[in-house]
Image (cartoon, helix red, strand yellow):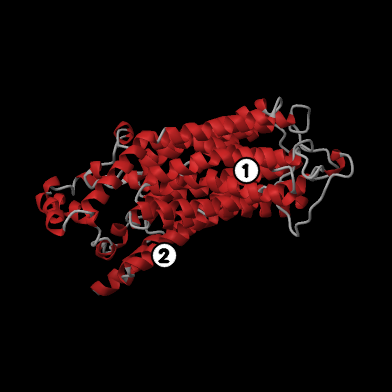
C-alpha cells in the first residue's frame, strides 16, 4: 500500500501542467517587484502580437487587389520616386492579377468593407469583453482570446491554399477575428492595473504602451517579408505567433497579486509618504468592510456612472478617430502628395508613415510622465489634443516642402495625436477602474477599460470611413475634420480640467499656510 507522501506525489503528477506550474510559482515566493516585471514583459509581448496580426490585412491588400496602395515596411530603406507609370510600381503576389473577389473594379471597396466590419465587431465586442473579463480569470480569458485570434487570422490565410474566392468567407472570418481581438485590451490593462498603483502609473504605462507601435512595425515586417512566398503565409505566421504567445500567457502571467499569493505591502510602502495616501488611509476604516465587494463585478451601467468615465470615453471617440484615420490613410496620403515636387513610391510612402508611430511612442511616454508629475490626467490629455490642432495644420500646409520637413511634422503629429490616446487607454482607464467611489472594489478594471476603448473604437471605425468619402473631393477637408475632432476631444474634458485646476490651486494655498495651521485639516479629516 502506497504511503501518503507517495499518494500526494502521484496526485501532483496527475494534475495538468498549467496547474502544476502555478503551484510551483506560488511556492517560489518571488518578490512583488519581480512579479511586476513579469507582468509588464508578458503583457507587452502579448499585445504586440495582437497588433501584429491586426496590421497584416493592410499589408496584404496590395496582393489581393493590385490597384490598392502597398504599405509594406521593407529594409533596406531607400527613397524611391515614381519615374514610371504607377501600375508598374505596384506589388502583387504573382503576375499582378490579384485574388478574386478583390481583383475586380470593386476590389478596393470590398477590402474597405472588411476593415469596417472588423472594427465594428471589435468595438461592439469590447463592451462584452470587459463585462466578461471582470467575471472570469483574466489569465484564462486572455489566453482564449489570443488563441482564437490566432485561429481566425490563420483561417483568413488558409483561403490562399484552399483557393477560396467567396467574399463572405473572408468577411465572416474577419468579423470573428475582430470579436476575439476585443478580448485583448481590457484584459492586459486590467492585469497591469491590478499590479501597479497610481504612483508612476502614467510613465510606466506610457513606456509599456509602445507595444502598439512595435506591433504595427513587426506585423508590417513579417507580412511584407512573407508576401513573396504567397499571401497566405502573411496571415498564418502571425496567427501562429499570437497563439504561441497565448500559451505563454497561460503559463506565465499572474493576473493579480492574490492569484500568486504576493504581498501588496511592498507596493503600498512606496506611496505611504503621499499626502493623498495619508488622507485615504484615515478615511478607509469609515468605509466599512469591503472584502465581499471585491468579489462582486461592477455592472455595465454602474461603470458608466463612475466619475470621469463618460467624458474620457467620448474624448477617446474623437482622439481615436484622428489616430486611426492616420493609421489607415497616412501611407495613401503620402503617396498621393507631391513632396519637393515629386511623388514617392508606395514602398517609400509606407516606410515614411512609420515616423508617425515613432512620434506616438514618445508622445505616450511624455503624456504619462507629465500626468504623473502634475497628478492631472485631464489637463495633460486636453493640452495634447489642443496642441494636435496646429500640428495637423502645419503638416497639411508645409509637409510637402521637403522630405525632412514632412518627417519632422509627421513625428510631431504622431506625438500629439497618440499621446492622449495612449494616456486615456492605459493610465486613465486603470485609474478609473480603481476609482475611490468603488470603495475598494477591484472588479471594474476590465469593464471600465472596455467602455472607454470600446467607445473610442467606434470613432476609429467612423474616421477612416468618412475619410474615404471626403478625400475624394479634398484632403484639406479631411484635415479640417481631424482638427475639429481634436478640438471636440479637448473640450469634452473641460469640466475635469477645471476640477483639476481647482484642486491644484487648493493644494498650493494649503502648502503656503503656516505649519501649525496646515496640520489642522489633516487632524479633522
Q: Determine which quarter of the picture holds residue 153.
A: top right
Q: Is residue 122 above or below residue 289?
A: above
* Residue located at (88% from left, 39% from top): 85
* Residue located at (37% from left, 68% from top): 34
State the CA–CA distance, disc 1 to disc 2: 34 Å
* Residue annotated with mark 2: 37
Which x, y percent locates residue 275? Answer: 22, 56
The nearer-to-camera label among 1 and 2 is 2
In terms of secondary structure, where does tag 2 sit? helix
Query: Can residue 1 be seen in this snapshot?
Result: no
In terms of secondary structure, where does tag 1 sit? helix
* Residue annotated with mark 1: 155
**Is residue 248 found left or right of 27 in the rendered image?**
right
* Residue located at (74% from left, 31% from top): 107
State which quarter of the image contains the N terminus: bottom left
**Is residue 401 found left or right of 501 in the rendered image?**
right
Amino acid at each position: 500500500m502506497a504511503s501518503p507522501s507517495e499518494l500526494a506525489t502521484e496526485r501532483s503528477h496527475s494534475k495538468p501542467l498549467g496547474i502544476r506550474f502555478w503551484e510551483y510559482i506560488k511556492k517560489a515566493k518571488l518578490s512583488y517587484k519581480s512579479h511586476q516585471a513579469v507582468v509588464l514583459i508578458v503583457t507587452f509581448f502579448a499585445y504586440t502580437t495582437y497588433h501584429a496580426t491586426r496590421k497584416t490585412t493592410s499589408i496584404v491588400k496590395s496582393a489581393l487587389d493590385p490597384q490598392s496602395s502597398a504599405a509594406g515596411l521593407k529594409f533596406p530603406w531607400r527613397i524611391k520616386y515614381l519615374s514610371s507609370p504607377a501600375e508598374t510600381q505596384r506589388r502583387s503576389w504573382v503576375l499582378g492579377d490579384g485574388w478574386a473577389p478583390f481583383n475586380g473594379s470593386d476590389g478596393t471597396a470590398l477590402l474597405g468593407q472588411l476593415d469596417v466590419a472588423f472594427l465594428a465587431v471589435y468595438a461592439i465586442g469590447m463592451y462584452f469583453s470587459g463585462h466578461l473579463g471582470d467575471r472570469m480569470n483574466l489569465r484564462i480569458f486572455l489566453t482564449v482570446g489570443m488563441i482564437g485570434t490566432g485561429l481566425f487570422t490563420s483561417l483568413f490565410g488558409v483561403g490562399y491554399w484552399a483557393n477560396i474566392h467567396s467574399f463572405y468567407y473572408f468577411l465572416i472570418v474577419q468579423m470573428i477575428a475582430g470579436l476575439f481581438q476585443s478580448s485583448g485590451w481590457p484584459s492586459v490593462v486590467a492585469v497591469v492595473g491590478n499590479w501597479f498603483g497610481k504612483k508612476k502609473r502614467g510613465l510606466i504605462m506610457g513606456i509599456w504602451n509602445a507595444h502598439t507601435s512595435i506591433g504595427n512595425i513587426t506585423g508590417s515586417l513579417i507580412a511584407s517579408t512573407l508576401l513573396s512566398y504567397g499571401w497566405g503565409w502573411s496571415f498564418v505566421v502571425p496567427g501562429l505567433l499570437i497563439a504561441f504567445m497565448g500559451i505563454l500567457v497561460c503559463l506565465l502571467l499572474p493576473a493579480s497579486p492574490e492569484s500568486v499569493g504576493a504581498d501588496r505591502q511592498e507596493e503600498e510602502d512606496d506611496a505611504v509618504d503621499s499626502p493623498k495616501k495619508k488622507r485615504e488611509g484615515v478615511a478607509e476604516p469609515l468605509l466599512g468592510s469591503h472584502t465581499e465587494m471585491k468579489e462582486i463585478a461592477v455592472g455595465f451601467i454602474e461603470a458608466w456612472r463612475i466619475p470621469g468615465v463618460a467624458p474620457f470615453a467620448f474624448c477617446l471617440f474623437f482622439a481615436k478617430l484622428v489616430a486611426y484615420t492616420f493609421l489607415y490613410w497616412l501611407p495613401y496620403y503620402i503617396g498621393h502628395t507631391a513632396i519637393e515636387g515629386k511623388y514617392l513610391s508606395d514602398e517609400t510612402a509606407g516606410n515614411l508613415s512609420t515616423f508617425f508611430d515613432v512620434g506616438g511612442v514618445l508622445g505616450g511616454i511624455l503624456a504619462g510622465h507629465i500626468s504623473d508629475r502634475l497628478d492631472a490626467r485631464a489637463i495633460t490629455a486636453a493640452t495634447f489634443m489642443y496642441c494636435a490642432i496646429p500640428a495637423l495644420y502645419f503638416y497639411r500646409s508645409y509637409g510637402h516642402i521637403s522630405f525632412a520637413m514632412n518627417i519632422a511634422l509627421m513625428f510631431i503629429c504622431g506625438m500629439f495625436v497618440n499621446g492622449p490616446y495612449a494616456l486615456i487607454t492605459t493610465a486613465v482607464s486603470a485609474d478609473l477602474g480603481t476609482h475611490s467611489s468603488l470603495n475598494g472594489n477591484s472588479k471594474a478594471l476590465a469593464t471600465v477599460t472596455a467602455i472607454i476603448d470600446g467607445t473610442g473604437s467606434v470613432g476609429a471605425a467612423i474616421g477612416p470611413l468618412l475619410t474615404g468619402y471626403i478625400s475624394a473631393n479634398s484632403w484639406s477637408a479631411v484635415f479640417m475634420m481631424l482638427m475639429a475632432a481634436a478640438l471636440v476631444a479637448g473640450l469634452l474634458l473641460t469640466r475635469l480640467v477645471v476640477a483639476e485646476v481647482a484642486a491644484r490651486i487648493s493644494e498650493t494655498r494649503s502648502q503656503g499656510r503656516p505649519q501649525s495651521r496646515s496640520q489642522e485639516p489633516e487632524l479633522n479629516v
